[in-house]
Amino acid sequence: MLSIECPWCGPRDEAEFRYGGQAHVTHPDDPDALDDAAWGEYLFFRDNPRGPFAERWCHSAGCRRWFDVVRDTATNKMRPGTPAARKPVSP
Amino acid sequence: MATTRPHPAEPPARLWRNPEPKRAYDVVIVGSGGHGLATAYYLARNHGITDVAVLERGWLAGGNMARNTTIIRSNYLLDQSAALYELALRLWEGLESELDYDFLLSQRGVLNLAHTEQEVRDSRRRVFANALNGIDAQWVSPPEIAELCPILDVSPDVRYPVLGATWQPRAGIAKHDYVAWAFARRADQLGVDLIQNCEVTGFTTDGDRVTGVETSRGTIAAGRVGLAAAGRTSLLTDTLGLRLPLQSHPLQALVSELLEPVHPCVVMSNHVHVYCSQAHKGELVLGAGIDSYNGYGQRGSVHVVEHQMAAALELFPVFARAHVIRTWAGTVDVTPDASPIIGPAPVENLFLNCGWGTGGFKATPGAGWVFAHTIATGGPHPVNEPYGLERFATGALIDEHGAAAVAH
């Protein structure tokens, strides 16, 4: 089980969290301007690196807030104090 | 007093050669798991293409093929899925004699349990869909389930009572390592080079065309390249700047100590979230869903194992004293619609077989059959035509989450 540092509640067990996938995927500014391929890219395509990955977690059994973390997908080491960590990302 | 010791037995004949890689092949397959080996075999058998290398970064069938839970079935809801997995099941049924290798295919049947009224409706719908697709399936009631699998708790006073199940008698299990070795031996006999300890690190290209692969043992030119690298597929396509709709997750499984034969079939439950069968040797083999986060570590979280064991005990109180012997995880590549991608890549001469998520083993011969066709002809077989990458732009998804054995 991962130990995940919630920026508001501190380190907690992974079981308290919900995974949100890649961070910083922004909604298209002008969705109507997108063709099908670009819309599909926004909906379905995410980075899948072996190594550092900026991702979202929700402390769903705690403060219920979303935050970002950089985790190494090979070692599961999480980088504490990620600059964006205290800044909830828009859903 | 001197004792004489018998000479050790001669090592058994090797099942395949261990050749040096040539500098060029007509076709290079990346990944020597079940899918890569089956593809190489059917390239040779069905299409006469024998100048083929299967490149493997570790040892043959040492990735997900060594880590799966060996279940074979074809009771899928959607027509596209039914066609693909039933093609595989029909091939499985003739494969031991065709490959001349007993890989212990045991068609002991699978029960997919329903624990809620909605699951009852969904399951019965799937039985009807299976019947329309010519796939054996029945709806069975709790007393019938008790006859098929006496150790399953079908009493009404448990937390999630079993309200019924679908039953596919032709489903079963096979010995996964033997399956790989059977394909490997035959592919080798047909002239395919199986090359282990040869990690593909990138591609050589000429404009928009792939012309070969860069490996830890040098550059190998290839007329066509087929990817069958499961969880690591997107790491390879990243080197081409090609993004795929894949997320790689740890998928855990575990086995118990050896027990007497007590469990006569395969039991799956989406609701309590576990599946279980008994291996030929006697271990209980248990699996459940993926871990939620992306990961390449080939290990998962303990709480996931705890949940699946709790679910197993809900169904099988008789297992309460069984000991866990091993847990492990594979790296599975999951697509947004829980169905695989099989078809040409948007780069010439490159072909994709990926995104099998948690269910690649059962499809092994079918996947090899249609992927070999796709590589040999440059276009999809009718069975894998709906499985192209373009569906993530057209929206023609094959959404099989609901009919998967255990949701992921």
Image: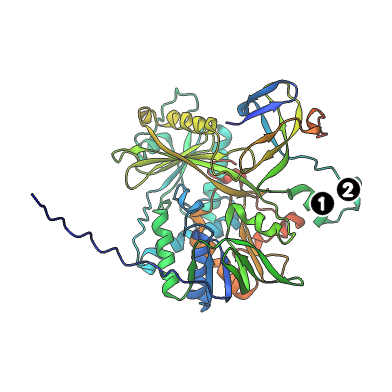
Subunit under mark 1? A
Q: Which amino acid type corresponds to the residue marked 2 in the rendered image? A: Pro
**Horizontally, is A24 left or right of B228 in the view?**
right
Marks 2 and 1, how far apart at CA: 8 Å
Q: Which residue is mark 2?
A: A31
The spot of residue B401 in percent (x, y) is 61, 45
Q: Is residue B345 left or right of residue B55?
A: right
Please count the marks in the image.
2
Image quarter for residue B181? Answer: bottom left
Please give the name of the residue rendered at 46% of the width and 76% of the height, measured from the top-left corner. Answer: B191
Q: Earlier in the sequence, mark 2 or mark 1?
A: 2
Residue found 54% across the figure and 75% down from its top: B22
The answer to whether any part of residue B87 appears in the image is no
Q: Which residue is mark 1?
A: A39
Asked whether the beta carbons under mark 2 and mark 1 sit within 8 Å of each other, the answer is yes
| SS for dot 2 | helix
How far across and how far down the image is residue B155, in percent?
41, 27
**What is the image's colouring?**
rainbow
| Quarter residue B218 falls in | bottom right
Query: Residue B407: where, in percent of width, then height?
Result: 58, 40
Q: Residue furthest front?
A: B1
Q: Is residue B10 above or below residue B4?
A: below
Q: Is residue A62 visible?
A: yes
Q: Quadrant of residue A2?
A: top right
Circle 1 — which element?
helix
Nearest the viewer among B16 and B124 is B16
x, y (%) of residue A29?
91, 45
What amino acid is at disc 1?
Trp
Q: Is residue A32 left or right of residue A57?
A: right
Residue B275, placed above or below residue B78:
above
